[in-house]
Image (cartoon, grey):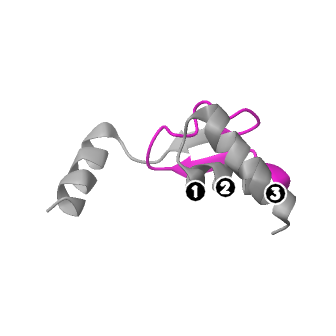
């Protein structure tokens, strides 16, 4: 990945107030023309240029969190 894409990713994560990796995923998606990201959380809501689809219901997400935290 070109350095400019990584720099844009960090800027995007700061602007959207999201984790650095999420900013990177969002930037790569935008660079590659991806319009929709499938995700487990709502971190991508404030990222312009992409739509996020949460693939788990709130109950499923709670079950996942319970499993991960045990």
Kindly report the distance in space between the C-alpha atoms of the residues bearing marks 2 and 3.
8 Å
Q: Which residues are magenta?
A: 30-51
Quarter of the rendering containing residue 58: top left
Who is closer to the viewer here, 3 or 26?
Answer: 3
Q: Is residue 47 left or right of residue 45?
A: right
Quarter of the rendering containing residue 59: top left
Considering the numbered disc 2 on the image, is that residue within a helix, a strand or a loop? helix
Kindly report the distance in space between the C-alpha atoms of the residues bearing marks 1 and 3.
13 Å
Considering the numbered disc 3 on the image, is that residue within a helix, a strand or a loop? helix
Kindly report the distance in space between the C-alpha atoms of the residues bearing marks 1 and 2.
5 Å
Residue 10 rendering spot, x and y as whole percentages = 68, 49
Circle 1/circle 2 CB separation < 8 Å: yes
Circle 1/circle 3 CB separation < 8 Å: no
Residue 46 vertical placement versus 55 (above, below): above
Residue 31 covered by magenta stretch = yes
Quarter of the rendering containing residue 12: top right
Question: Which residue matches tag 3?
Answer: 5
Q: Quadrant of the C terminus?
A: bottom left
Q: Tag 3 or tag 2, which sits nearer the N-term? A: 3
Residue 49 rendering spot, x and y as whole percentages = 77, 36
Residue 53 vertical placement versus 67 (above, below): above
Question: Which residue matches tag 1?
Answer: 21
Circle 2/circle 3 CB separation < 8 Å: no
**Picture disc at residue 24:** 2
């Amino acid at each position: 990945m070109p350095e400019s894409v990584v720099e844009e990713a960090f800027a995007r994560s700061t602007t959207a107030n999201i984790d650095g990796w999420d900013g990177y995923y969002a930037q790569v998606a935008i660079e590659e023309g991806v319009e929709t990201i499938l995700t487990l959380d709502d971190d991508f809501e404030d990222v312009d240029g992409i739509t996020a689809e949460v693939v788990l219901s709130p109950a499923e997400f709670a079950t996942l969190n319970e499993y991960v935290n045990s």
